Amino acid sequence: MIVVALEGLDGSGKTTLCRALSSADWSDHRVACLTSPSETVSRLCYEWRGRNIHASALGFLLGTKLMLRELSDKYDLVVFDRYLLSTLVHHFGAVEGSETEFDGFLRAMDYHAPDLTIYLDCPVSVSLSRISRRAGDRPLVVSLEAQRELYLSIPKGRKLHSWLSNRTIQLNNGDEVNFDQTVKSAYDAICQLLRRNSAARVS
């Protein structure tokens, strides 16, 4: 099964893109577009995060892994709204030596590295504006800026690159960007991945 990860700040458009892709024409391919993990697991992870950041990360990873196990026989490709990169940024980003510990978690769990990561980038001001339309607490600007810096730096050669994705593309999704074009770019990249996978099976 192919795994595609949508990553980015809160308010970057991941969930909106995931919904758009769920209604796309995938021809004969069985494609699922999901928010990961379930709402129940997500709620627990946020509760645990205030007590123990490692427990929160492990809960998120286990929840996603269980979802993958359940879906493996039903779908050719799964698109996740949040996956490994966001787990590293949110749970381990500010912790010294975090990459080594995160790597240990993934190896112990025999985790599925994404075949494609689509990182949606947008200015922090845009992220805050979009988040402000939702209910709940607003994140601190400094927190979002630190997260964005990590998102931009992690795929560029840091030691966890092999876990994050076989391929990473960055799509800008600020207010000045036509979202239909963002959807098309993501859809085209996924279709290319599906074609490559089909060709590899034939050969």
Image (cartoon, helix red, strand yellow):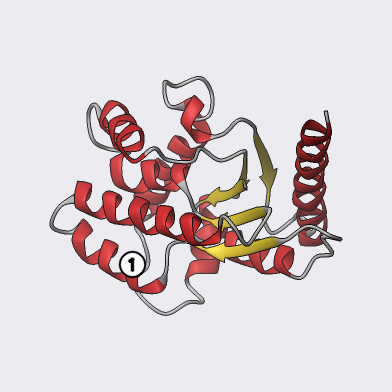
Q: What residue does disc 1 label?
A: 41
- Who is closer to the viewer here, 22 or 14? 22
Residue visible at 80% across and 65% down? 24
Q: Position of residue 42 (x, y in %)?
A: 35, 66
Looking at the image, residue 147 lies above or below residue 9? above
The C terminus appears in which quarter of the rendering? top right
Tell me where residue 180 sits by quadrant. bottom right
Residue visible at 30% across and 35% down? 108
- Who is closer to the viewer here, 18 or 112? 112
Q: Position of residue 162 (x, y in %)?
A: 50, 26
Tell me where residue 97 sits by quadrant. top left
Tell me where residue 111 sits by quadrant. top left
- In the shown orientation, is residue 53 left or right of residue 167? left
Q: Position of residue 57 (x, y in %)?
A: 29, 50
Question: Amino acid under label 1?
Answer: Val
Residue visible at 82% across and 47% down? 188
Helix, strand or loop at label 1? It is helix
- Who is closer to the viewer here, 55 or 70? 70
Looking at the image, residue 61 lies above or below residue 137? above
